[in-house]
Image (cartoon, rainbow, N blue to C red):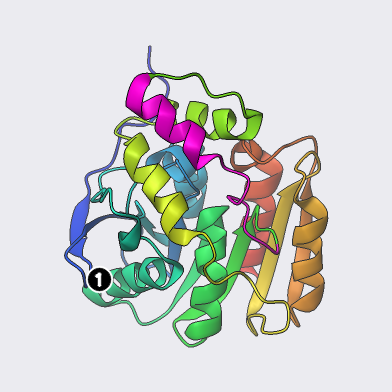
Amino acid sequence: MDLLPPPPQSQSVMAADGVPIATYDLGDPDGPVVLAVHGFASSAYANFVATGWVRELHRAGFRVIAVDQRGHGASGKPHDPAAYSMPRLVADVRALLDAHLIHEAAWVGYSLGARVGWHAAVEDPVAITRAVLGGIPDGDPLIRFRVDQATALIRDGTPVSDRLTQAYLTMAGRTPGNDLAALVALVEGMRGGPQPDPARPPQQAVLFAAGTEDPILEASERLAAATPRGEFLRIPGRDHFNAPTARAFRSGALEFLTRS
């Protein structure tokens, strides 16, 4: 028997450059809105539906607007690196807020979704009221991703020797609908782009979180320390890839989001 919840129905929002962005409107339609933005090579379903986040946010009375970021899930998957940049990913979320007539929302993001959340919170402090940023470092976490090895794997099946690159590709292969060429294009397109700047942090209340086994833990703690209303949650025994499934992470985020 399949114990996982069924995938929700998506609605497409057209980005400014014509890429369709899949969104999922879940939970209490009259509740306060939480934007759920997943990590690299994942999806709204994998990060937030299958792991229980949407269920628990719904029980707490929230309306969840989840998104498949461009290059992921049911969204458009351009193979051109020029289609991917931090400003484009932030603009995609702005477009879905406008399409759903949402004026303000809390943000829950993990990894890539947390990096996008940092920039969205800095750029639009009125729309983004508070944020949970999980697995976010103070630099480019994909700089070590071996684009050459991933491209060779796609081209002719050459095995990947770099462990980090292989870990990301293995995770990507477990998510239905992923397009490896699009994900590699995303890495190429975002390299060298804007990174979280500790000198210009969000001014909203922000809960940072990372697993105690995640190599980015200390870098994430530095971002929290630089954020005027930043807090930090250590997720015991979790690494970068399995932290989103931790009950301690969900519980800490819910306490933060429901705090008056």
Q: Is residue 239 magenta?
A: no
Task: Name the residue at 56% across, 28% down.
Answer: 166
Indicate the quadrant where residue 176 lies. top left
Q: What span is in magenta?
A: 138-156
Q: Is residue 152 magenta?
A: yes
Picture quarter with the N terminus = top left
Indicate the quadrant where residue 73 lies. top left
Task: Name the residue at 25% across, 71% down.
Answer: 100
Q: How many marks?
A: 1
Amino acid type, residue under disc 1 in the picture? His
Task: Name the residue at 63% across, 81% down.
Answer: 204
Image coordinates for residue 9, horizontal then vertical, percent: 22, 44
Up the image or down, 44 lies above or below 194; here it is above
Picture quarter with the C terminus = bottom right
Image coordinates for residue 178, horizontal then vertical, percent: 34, 35
Q: Nearer the viewer, residue 157 or 28?
A: 157
Up the image or down, 211 lies above or below 19; here it is above
Which residue reaches farthest top?
1
Task: Name the residue at 78% across, 77% down.
Answer: 226
Image coordinates for residue 95, horizontal then vertical, percent: 28, 73
Up the image or down, 3 lies above or below 139; here it is above
Q: Name the residue that disc number 1 marks.
A: 100
Judged from the image, the secondary structure of the residue bearing numbered disc 1 is loop
Q: Is residue 44 visible?
A: no
User: Taking 65 as reference, is 211 left or right?
Assistant: right
Image coordinates for residue 165, horizontal then vertical, percent: 57, 34
User: Taking 227 as reference, is 170 left or right?
Assistant: left
User: Taking 177 as reference, is 148 left or right?
Assistant: right
- Tag 1: Cα neighbours inside 10 Å, few (<14), some, or many (≥20)? few
Q: Is residue 16 visible?
A: yes
